[in-house]
Amino acid sequence: MASRAWLVAATAALSATLPYGLQPAAAATPTSDMSVAGAAIHVELDPGAFQSSDALMQWIRRSANIVAHYYDRFPTPRLTVQVIPQSGGGVHGGKTWANPDGFIRMQVGREASDAQLLADWVLVHEMTHLALPDTGEEHAWLSEGLATYVEGIARVQAGNRSEADVWAEEMRQMPRGLPEPDDRGLDHTHSW
């Protein structure tokens, strides 16, 4: 039995690093479909695992509309959003793959509140990655920088964040991008 538990854990760890299309078949996961700005969005989540699956669906729709408004269309015609339950509240993180179709895996707290989902920036950031071709790990500074910039501006334009809040965050965070001793330039660093 211990070896089976190890195999399940190893498979889960491996699948977390694989792009969509190379994912092992998951157990039956309840799904929902929605259309936003002409894009077909397929959502995989277990509604029984979360405090409010309706709030999660509204969060996904709102985030997609913010991105579609910024670009005048959604960046990809098809997207799957997989929502993985985690302990606690809030949004814990996400990862995006753009090929062959858009796939975003989000880790969300089981007790995520409406207010936490309304204030979330992560899903808009992840959806923004779909608008830029994959630049490779050595150019992550470009894709991360663009997604970070667009997220704030797009949310302000949609009324989901204040302009003063975005500027305050920029002033607080921009110094993190200054060169540090032994930095090897943008193409060779994974730090801020």
Image (cartoon, grey):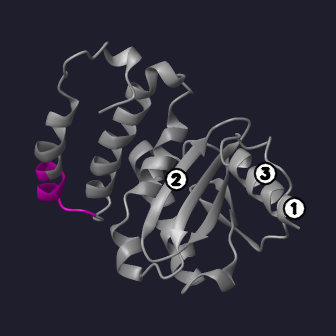
Please, what is the three-letter code of the amino acid marked with disc 1?
A: Arg
By secondary structure, the bulk of the magenta-drawn segment is best described as helix
SS type, badge 3: helix
Please give the label number shown on residue 4: 1
User: Label 1: how many residues lie within 10 Å, few (<14), some (14-19) or many (20+)?
Assistant: few
> Which corner quadrant of the image does residue 72 belong to?
top left
Which of discs 3 and 1 lies nearer the camera? The answer is 1
Q: Position of residue 40 (x, y in %)?
A: 69, 56
Q: Position of residue 192 (x, y in %)?
A: 29, 33
Instruction: From this view, report whether residue 68 is shown above or below residue 82.
Output: above
Q: Which residue is mark 2?
A: 94
SS type, badge 2: strand
The N terminus: image quadrant: bottom right
**Label 2 – label 1 distance at C-alpha:** 28 Å
Q: Which residue is mark 3?
A: 11
Please, what is the three-letter code of the amino acid marked with disc 2?
A: Gly
Which of discs 2 and 3 lies nearer the camera? The answer is 3
Name which residue lies at 81% across and 63% down: 5
Q: Position of residue 123 (x, y in %)?
A: 47, 57
Residue numbers of the magenta segment: 161-168
Name which residue lies at 33% across and 31% down: 191
